[in-house]
Image: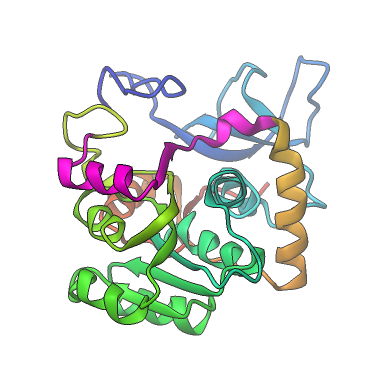
Protein backbone atom coordinates (compact mmCIF):
# COMPACT_ATOMS: atom_id res chain seq x y z
CA UNK A 1 0.00 0.00 0.00
CA UNK A 2 3.03 2.31 0.41
CA UNK A 3 4.01 4.48 -2.53
CA UNK A 4 7.49 2.99 -2.21
CA UNK A 5 6.89 -0.71 -1.69
CA UNK A 6 10.56 -1.53 -1.16
CA UNK A 7 10.10 -4.47 -3.54
CA UNK A 8 11.00 -4.16 -7.21
CA UNK A 9 8.44 -6.80 -8.20
CA UNK A 10 5.45 -5.05 -6.58
CA UNK A 11 3.73 -1.81 -7.53
CA UNK A 12 1.66 0.05 -4.94
CA UNK A 13 -2.12 0.01 -5.16
CA UNK A 14 -3.47 3.16 -6.79
CA UNK A 15 -6.42 5.24 -5.59
CA UNK A 16 -9.48 4.89 -7.83
CA UNK A 17 -8.14 1.63 -9.31
CA UNK A 18 -9.04 -1.96 -8.44
CA UNK A 19 -6.79 -3.61 -5.89
CA UNK A 20 -4.69 -6.45 -7.27
CA UNK A 21 -3.43 -9.77 -6.00
CA UNK A 22 -2.80 -13.36 -6.96
CA UNK A 23 -5.75 -14.88 -8.75
CA UNK A 24 -7.04 -17.53 -11.13
CA UNK A 25 -9.51 -16.89 -13.94
CA UNK A 26 -10.94 -18.30 -17.14
CA UNK A 27 -10.59 -16.62 -20.54
CA UNK A 28 -14.02 -15.69 -21.91
CA UNK A 29 -12.71 -13.89 -25.02
CA UNK A 30 -9.25 -13.37 -26.49
CA UNK A 31 -7.53 -11.52 -29.30
CA UNK A 32 -4.12 -13.01 -28.52
CA UNK A 33 -2.75 -16.06 -30.31
CA UNK A 34 -1.47 -17.73 -27.12
CA UNK A 35 -4.79 -17.63 -25.27
CA UNK A 36 -8.20 -18.91 -26.28
CA UNK A 37 -11.67 -19.01 -24.83
CA UNK A 38 -11.84 -21.51 -21.97
CA UNK A 39 -8.16 -21.36 -21.03
CA UNK A 40 -7.46 -21.19 -17.30
CA UNK A 41 -4.90 -18.54 -16.32
CA UNK A 42 -3.16 -17.34 -13.20
CA UNK A 43 -1.66 -13.93 -12.47
CA UNK A 44 0.27 -12.33 -9.64
CA UNK A 45 -1.62 -9.09 -10.37
CA UNK A 46 -5.24 -10.02 -11.05
CA UNK A 47 -7.66 -7.17 -10.24
CA UNK A 48 -10.16 -7.75 -7.44
CA UNK A 49 -13.15 -7.75 -9.78
CA UNK A 50 -15.27 -10.35 -11.52
CA UNK A 51 -14.33 -9.41 -15.10
CA UNK A 52 -11.09 -7.84 -16.32
CA UNK A 53 -9.55 -6.81 -19.63
CA UNK A 54 -5.90 -7.83 -19.34
CA UNK A 55 -2.68 -7.81 -21.28
CA UNK A 56 -1.16 -11.28 -21.71
CA UNK A 57 1.99 -10.06 -19.95
CA UNK A 58 2.11 -11.67 -16.55
CA UNK A 59 -0.54 -14.28 -17.33
CA UNK A 60 0.41 -17.94 -16.86
CA UNK A 61 -1.65 -20.57 -18.61
CA UNK A 62 -2.64 -23.37 -16.25
CA UNK A 63 -2.73 -27.10 -16.82
CA UNK A 64 -5.96 -28.40 -15.19
CA UNK A 65 -4.54 -31.95 -15.33
CA UNK A 66 -1.56 -30.98 -13.17
CA UNK A 67 -3.96 -29.32 -10.74
CA UNK A 68 -6.21 -32.38 -10.61
CA UNK A 69 -9.11 -30.13 -11.56
CA UNK A 70 -8.77 -28.02 -8.38
CA UNK A 71 -7.91 -24.55 -9.69
CA UNK A 72 -7.27 -22.97 -6.29
CA UNK A 73 -4.14 -25.12 -5.95
CA UNK A 74 -2.52 -22.77 -8.49
CA UNK A 75 -2.63 -20.07 -5.81
CA UNK A 76 -1.18 -22.25 -3.06
CA UNK A 77 0.54 -25.62 -3.05
CA UNK A 78 0.91 -25.73 -6.85
CA UNK A 79 1.71 -22.06 -7.25
CA UNK A 80 3.95 -19.40 -5.80
CA UNK A 81 3.62 -20.43 -2.10
CA UNK A 82 4.43 -24.07 -2.87
CA UNK A 83 7.35 -23.19 -5.11
CA UNK A 84 8.61 -20.73 -2.50
CA UNK A 85 8.56 -23.41 0.19
CA UNK A 86 10.24 -26.06 -1.96
CA UNK A 87 12.87 -23.89 -3.62
CA UNK A 88 13.57 -21.97 -0.42
CA UNK A 89 14.39 -25.23 1.33
CA UNK A 90 16.40 -26.64 -1.59
CA UNK A 91 18.30 -23.48 -2.45
CA UNK A 92 18.86 -21.94 1.00
CA UNK A 93 17.99 -24.54 3.64
CA UNK A 94 20.71 -27.17 3.19
CA UNK A 95 18.43 -29.92 4.52
CA UNK A 96 20.38 -33.19 4.33
CA UNK A 97 18.80 -36.65 4.70
CA UNK A 98 20.33 -38.63 7.56
CA UNK A 99 21.95 -35.58 9.19
CA UNK A 100 19.49 -35.53 12.11
CA UNK A 101 18.68 -31.87 11.52
CA UNK A 102 16.11 -29.71 13.29
CA UNK A 103 13.94 -27.49 11.10
CA UNK A 104 11.85 -24.61 12.50
CA UNK A 105 9.30 -22.58 10.54
CA UNK A 106 7.39 -19.48 11.66
CA UNK A 107 4.00 -18.59 10.24
CA UNK A 108 3.72 -22.36 10.21
CA UNK A 109 -0.03 -22.58 9.60
CA UNK A 110 -0.01 -20.18 6.65
CA UNK A 111 0.01 -20.87 2.92
CA UNK A 112 3.79 -21.20 2.69
CA UNK A 113 4.71 -22.29 6.21
CA UNK A 114 2.25 -25.20 6.34
CA UNK A 115 3.88 -26.58 3.19
CA UNK A 116 7.46 -25.78 4.23
CA UNK A 117 7.31 -27.96 7.34
CA UNK A 118 5.97 -30.92 5.38
CA UNK A 119 8.48 -30.43 2.57
CA UNK A 120 11.36 -30.24 5.04
CA UNK A 121 10.32 -33.65 6.32
CA UNK A 122 10.08 -35.03 2.77
CA UNK A 123 13.53 -33.60 2.03
CA UNK A 124 15.07 -35.33 5.03
CA UNK A 125 14.70 -33.16 8.16
CA UNK A 126 14.56 -35.33 11.28
CA UNK A 127 12.78 -32.89 13.58
CA UNK A 128 10.18 -30.32 12.42
CA UNK A 129 8.82 -27.53 14.64
CA UNK A 130 6.19 -24.95 13.72
CA UNK A 131 5.47 -21.59 15.35
CA UNK A 132 1.93 -20.24 14.94
CA UNK A 133 -0.73 -18.18 16.70
CA UNK A 134 -3.42 -20.44 18.17
CA UNK A 135 -3.94 -23.77 19.87
CA UNK A 136 -6.19 -24.84 16.99
CA UNK A 137 -3.36 -24.24 14.55
CA UNK A 138 -0.86 -26.04 16.80
CA UNK A 139 -3.13 -29.08 16.89
CA UNK A 140 -3.47 -29.01 13.10
CA UNK A 141 0.30 -28.93 12.62
CA UNK A 142 0.88 -31.87 14.93
CA UNK A 143 -2.09 -34.09 14.14
CA UNK A 144 -2.71 -33.46 10.43
CA UNK A 145 0.49 -32.11 8.90
CA UNK A 146 3.03 -34.27 10.71
CA UNK A 147 5.01 -31.64 12.64
CA UNK A 148 6.79 -33.01 15.70
CA UNK A 149 6.00 -29.96 17.82
CA UNK A 150 4.11 -26.67 17.54
CA UNK A 151 4.54 -23.50 19.59
CA UNK A 152 1.76 -20.96 20.16
CA UNK A 153 3.64 -17.66 20.25
CA UNK A 154 0.64 -15.89 21.80
CA UNK A 155 0.61 -18.03 24.94
CA UNK A 156 3.91 -19.94 25.11
CA UNK A 157 7.34 -18.64 26.06
CA UNK A 158 8.94 -19.25 22.66
CA UNK A 159 12.54 -19.26 23.95
CA UNK A 160 11.78 -21.75 26.72
CA UNK A 161 9.78 -24.03 24.43
CA UNK A 162 12.53 -24.06 21.81
CA UNK A 163 15.10 -25.05 24.43
CA UNK A 164 12.79 -27.83 25.58
CA UNK A 165 11.93 -29.34 22.20
CA UNK A 166 15.13 -28.54 20.27
CA UNK A 167 17.82 -29.79 22.67
CA UNK A 168 20.34 -30.14 19.83
CA UNK A 169 19.75 -26.59 18.62
CA UNK A 170 18.29 -25.49 15.30
CA UNK A 171 19.84 -26.19 11.91
CA UNK A 172 17.43 -24.51 9.49
CA UNK A 173 14.93 -21.73 10.13
CA UNK A 174 12.30 -20.85 7.53
CA UNK A 175 11.52 -17.25 8.48
CA UNK A 176 8.11 -15.89 7.47
CA UNK A 177 7.58 -13.34 10.22
CA UNK A 178 10.75 -11.53 11.36
CA UNK A 179 10.73 -9.43 14.50
CA UNK A 180 11.02 -10.75 18.04
CA UNK A 181 10.08 -14.33 17.19
CA UNK A 182 12.81 -14.64 14.60
CA UNK A 183 15.38 -13.04 16.88
CA UNK A 184 14.48 -15.63 19.53
CA UNK A 185 14.90 -18.51 17.07
CA UNK A 186 18.24 -17.24 15.76
CA UNK A 187 19.65 -17.10 19.29
CA UNK A 188 19.21 -20.89 19.50
CA UNK A 189 20.62 -21.77 16.08
CA UNK A 190 23.70 -23.93 15.65
CA UNK A 191 27.03 -22.92 14.15
CA UNK A 192 26.93 -23.26 10.37
CA UNK A 193 23.13 -23.25 10.28
CA UNK A 194 20.86 -21.49 7.78
CA UNK A 195 18.02 -18.95 7.82
CA UNK A 196 15.69 -18.98 4.82
CA UNK A 197 14.61 -15.31 4.74
CA UNK A 198 11.21 -15.63 3.08
CA UNK A 199 8.98 -13.02 4.74
CA UNK A 200 8.84 -10.51 7.60
CA UNK A 201 5.12 -9.97 8.08
CA UNK A 202 5.45 -8.77 11.69
CA UNK A 203 7.14 -5.54 10.49
CA UNK A 204 5.31 -4.85 7.22
CA UNK A 205 3.39 -1.96 8.80
CA UNK A 206 6.61 -0.30 9.95
CA UNK A 207 8.49 2.24 7.85
CA UNK A 208 11.70 0.23 7.51
CA UNK A 209 13.61 -1.16 4.51
CA UNK A 210 13.39 -4.80 3.48
CA UNK A 211 14.95 -6.90 4.87
CA UNK A 212 14.40 -4.90 8.04
CA UNK A 213 17.32 -4.15 10.37
CA UNK A 214 17.97 -6.52 13.26
CA UNK A 215 19.49 -5.85 16.70
CA UNK A 216 23.26 -5.84 16.94
CA UNK A 217 23.26 -8.81 19.31
CA UNK A 218 21.51 -10.91 16.63
CA UNK A 219 23.87 -9.64 13.94
CA UNK A 220 26.80 -10.71 16.13
CA UNK A 221 25.31 -14.20 16.58
CA UNK A 222 24.91 -14.60 12.82
CA UNK A 223 28.52 -13.62 12.29
CA UNK A 224 30.06 -15.52 15.21
CA UNK A 225 28.23 -18.76 14.38
CA UNK A 226 28.60 -18.40 10.60
CA UNK A 227 24.83 -18.55 10.10
CA UNK A 228 23.71 -17.76 6.57
CA UNK A 229 20.77 -15.34 6.28
CA UNK A 230 20.16 -14.33 2.70
CA UNK A 231 16.99 -12.88 1.23
CA UNK A 232 15.05 -15.49 -0.75
CA UNK A 233 12.76 -14.51 -3.63
CA UNK A 234 11.21 -17.30 -5.68
CA UNK A 235 10.97 -15.03 -8.74
CA UNK A 236 14.75 -15.34 -9.01
CA UNK A 237 14.35 -19.06 -9.73
CA UNK A 238 11.82 -19.04 -12.55
CA UNK A 239 13.94 -21.53 -14.51
CA UNK A 240 13.14 -24.09 -11.79
CA UNK A 241 9.49 -23.17 -11.33
CA UNK A 242 7.88 -25.76 -13.60
CA UNK A 243 10.07 -28.58 -12.31
CA UNK A 244 9.10 -27.60 -8.77
CA UNK A 245 5.39 -27.59 -9.58
CA UNK A 246 5.64 -31.09 -11.02
CA UNK A 247 7.35 -32.33 -7.85
CA UNK A 248 4.76 -30.63 -5.66
CA UNK A 249 1.88 -32.03 -7.74
CA UNK A 250 3.34 -35.53 -7.41
CA UNK A 251 3.47 -35.22 -3.63
CA UNK A 252 -0.07 -33.79 -3.46
CA UNK A 253 -1.55 -36.52 -5.66
CA UNK A 254 0.32 -39.21 -3.69
CA UNK A 255 -1.04 -37.83 -0.42
CA UNK A 256 2.43 -36.97 0.88
CA UNK A 257 1.76 -33.21 0.92
CA UNK A 258 -1.47 -32.09 2.57
CA UNK A 259 -3.05 -28.83 1.47
CA UNK A 260 -5.08 -26.54 3.71
CA UNK A 261 -7.25 -23.66 2.50
CA UNK A 262 -9.49 -21.07 4.13
CA UNK A 263 -12.26 -20.18 1.68
CA UNK A 264 -14.60 -17.19 1.71
CA UNK A 265 -17.49 -17.08 -0.77
CA UNK A 266 -18.21 -14.07 -2.99
CA UNK A 267 -16.16 -11.18 -4.34
CA UNK A 268 -17.76 -8.91 -1.74
CA UNK A 269 -15.77 -10.87 0.90
CA UNK A 270 -12.39 -9.93 -0.60
CA UNK A 271 -11.67 -7.02 1.75
CA UNK A 272 -12.76 -9.03 4.78
CA UNK A 273 -10.54 -11.92 3.68
CA UNK A 274 -7.54 -9.61 3.27
CA UNK A 275 -7.95 -8.11 6.74
CA UNK A 276 -8.45 -11.57 8.26
CA UNK A 277 -5.26 -12.78 6.55
CA UNK A 278 -3.24 -9.96 8.06
CA UNK A 279 -4.60 -10.88 11.52
CA UNK A 280 -3.75 -14.57 11.12
CA UNK A 281 -7.33 -15.67 10.52
CA UNK A 282 -6.37 -18.15 7.81
CA UNK A 283 -5.21 -21.75 7.91
CA UNK A 284 -3.24 -22.50 4.77
CA UNK A 285 -3.98 -20.36 1.72
CA UNK A 286 -6.67 -17.70 2.00
CA UNK A 287 -9.00 -18.09 -1.00
CA UNK A 288 -11.90 -15.90 -2.12
CA UNK A 289 -14.16 -17.98 -4.39
CA UNK A 290 -15.81 -15.59 -6.85
CA UNK A 291 -17.48 -17.95 -9.35
CA UNK A 292 -17.13 -21.36 -10.93
CA UNK A 293 -15.79 -21.36 -14.51
Quadrant of image for the N terminus:
top left
Pinpoint residue 241: horizontal percent, then vertical percent: 69, 38
Whether the magenta-drawn stretch holds residue 134 is answered as: no
Pinpoint residue 157: horizontal percent, then vertical percent: 18, 74
User: Which range of residues does the magenta coloring cover?
Assistant: 213-238
Whether the magenta-drawn stretch holds residue 216 is answered as: yes
What is the total number of numbered labels drawn onto the structure image? 0
In the rendered image of this protein, does residue 54 appear above or below residue 206?
A: above
Any part of residue 68 in sight: no
**In the foreground, 99 or 4:** 99
Instruction: Residue at 35%, 60% (x, y): give it.
Output: 189
Pinpoint residue 239: horizontal percent, then vertical percent: 72, 31
Instruction: Residue at 16%, 35% (x, y): give it.
Output: 206
Q: What is the basis of the colouring in this image?
A: rainbow
**In the foreground, 133 or 173:** 173
In the rendered image of this protein, does residue 23 appear above or below residue 78?
A: above
Residue at far front of view? 224
Left or right: where 98 falls relative to 158:
right
- Asked where in the image residue 160 lies, by quadrant, the reply is bottom left
Instruction: Residue at 53%, 75% (x, y): give it.
Output: 145
**In the foreground, 82 or 67:** 82
**In the foreground, 39 or 225:** 225
Instruction: Residue at 28%, 54% (x, y): give it.
Output: 182
Left or right: where 285 falls relative to 257:
left
In the rendered image of this protein, does residue 238 appear above or below residue 175?
A: above
Any part of residue 65 in sight: yes
Left or right: where 20 falls relative to 244:
left
Pinpoint residue 256: horizontal percent, then vertical percent: 69, 72
Amino acid sequence: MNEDTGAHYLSPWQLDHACEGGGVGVVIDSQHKDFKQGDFVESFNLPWQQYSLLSPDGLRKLDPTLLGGKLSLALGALGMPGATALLGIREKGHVTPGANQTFVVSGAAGACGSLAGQIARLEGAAHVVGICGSEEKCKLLREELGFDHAINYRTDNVADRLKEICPRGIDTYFDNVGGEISETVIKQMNAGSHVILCGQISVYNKDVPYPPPIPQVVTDILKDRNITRERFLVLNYQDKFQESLIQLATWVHEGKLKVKETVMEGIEKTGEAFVSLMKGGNVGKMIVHVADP
